[in-house]
Image (cartoon, coloured by chain):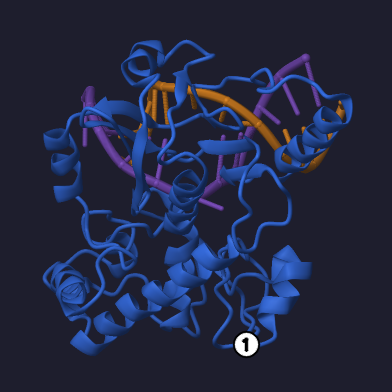
Chain colours: A blue, B purple, C orange
Amino acid sequence: MPEGHSVHRIAMQFDRDFVGKTVEVSSPQGRFSPGAALLTGSVMKTARAVGKQLFLEFEDERWLRVHLGIYGAWDFLGRISLLSGDTTASGSIGAPRLRRAVRMAETEREREASNEIFPPAPVGAVRVRIATATAVADLRGPTACEVLDPAQVEAVLNRLGPDPLNDSGPNAEERFVTAITSRSAPIGVLLMDQSVVSGIGNVYRAEILFRARLNPHTRGKNLPRDVADSLWSDWAHLLRIGVETGHMLTMDSLDPDAHERAQAHIDDRHWVYKREGLPCRLCRGEIIMEVMAARKLYWCPTDQA
DNA sequence: GGGTAATGAATAA
DNA sequence: TATTCCTTACCCA
């Protein structure tokens, strides 16, 4: 359930602790054994996120493409750099596995206390393990995990809409605005379309639409240019906050106190997401839920009329 | 111990 | 639109 911010953080973690190093790549679960054999023993050269896709470059122009899908997650173990917003020395980025993160942290302490051998044995269904002498990254549950050549990477990138962290400036914004305003599909569908814009998922979709006070059924081609512009700016803004904090905080600018509250109470993090039947934070009317683009969409029919 | 939902998307039909 | 992929956490017994 990682949206774009998680994948950027994963790329940052790889950049800090794995890039430039020779890595052992294995598939404890077995399903990626052939791919692992192609990569193991080589140096990781770059780590890059584009929307929800992660690209790890290895020697000899081999790339590992990983898409976490709805349940995938990376666990980082061992000597791992703390990223901004991190609270434990090891943890999970991807699907919400707070329990796991805590358990891992405890395991880590026990390991250090008992001088157990590094690396630790894989727990559960680990599709891929990437290891240096001091750090381990375990991947489980990805929807895509494959070794590609540069041409294949290029082909994937060509299908993807702009990502504000990779593509800033008027060019990217223009691509986004054109993609939105030229189509008759509802804006609630278009924001989830990764060929229109990269990295937005179900949480950010609902929150961005509320922040813009936009009815999700509004057709893309009926959106004024300046509204489409502001959607792009807001996504860029929220993505930066997400990468910085590691959380999908969406109540920052409209409620200055929300950031602090969100640290303490996870339920205060969103305007509408997962708040079906609860009173709207602005008008106190009931938040409703409907399925759009095969996902649950939450919105306020009064404020987003 | 079972059922379900979950921050996703390709594919079938 | 429905099904499938794949894994885990949580809720309920």
Q: From the viewer's perspective, is A12 left or right of A157?
A: right
Q: How many tags in the picture?
A: 1
Tell me residue A142's x, y (percent). 45, 32
Query: Which residue corresponds to the image point at 27% horizontal and 30% vertical from the top-left?
Result: A59
Q: Is residue A268 left or right of residue A21?
A: right
The quadrant in which the C terminus of chain A is found is: bottom left
Q: Position of residue A45 (x, y in %)?
A: 33, 39
Tell me the residue at 69%/23% (across/down): A118
Which residue position holds label 1?
A: A255
Depth check, front residue: A76 or A249? A76
Q: Quadrant of residue A25?
A: top left
Relative to the observer, which residue lies in front, A141 or A295?
A: A141
Near mark 1 (Cα within 10 A), the count class, few <14, some 14-19 or many ≥20, is few
Q: Secondary structure at mark 1?
A: loop
Three-letter amino acid code of the residue under disc 1: Asp
A33 over A118 or under it: above or below: above
Q: Quadrant of residue A168?
A: bottom left
When the figure is inspected, residue A165 is found, relative to residue A291, above or below; the finding is: below
Residue A244 position in % (x across, y down): 54, 67
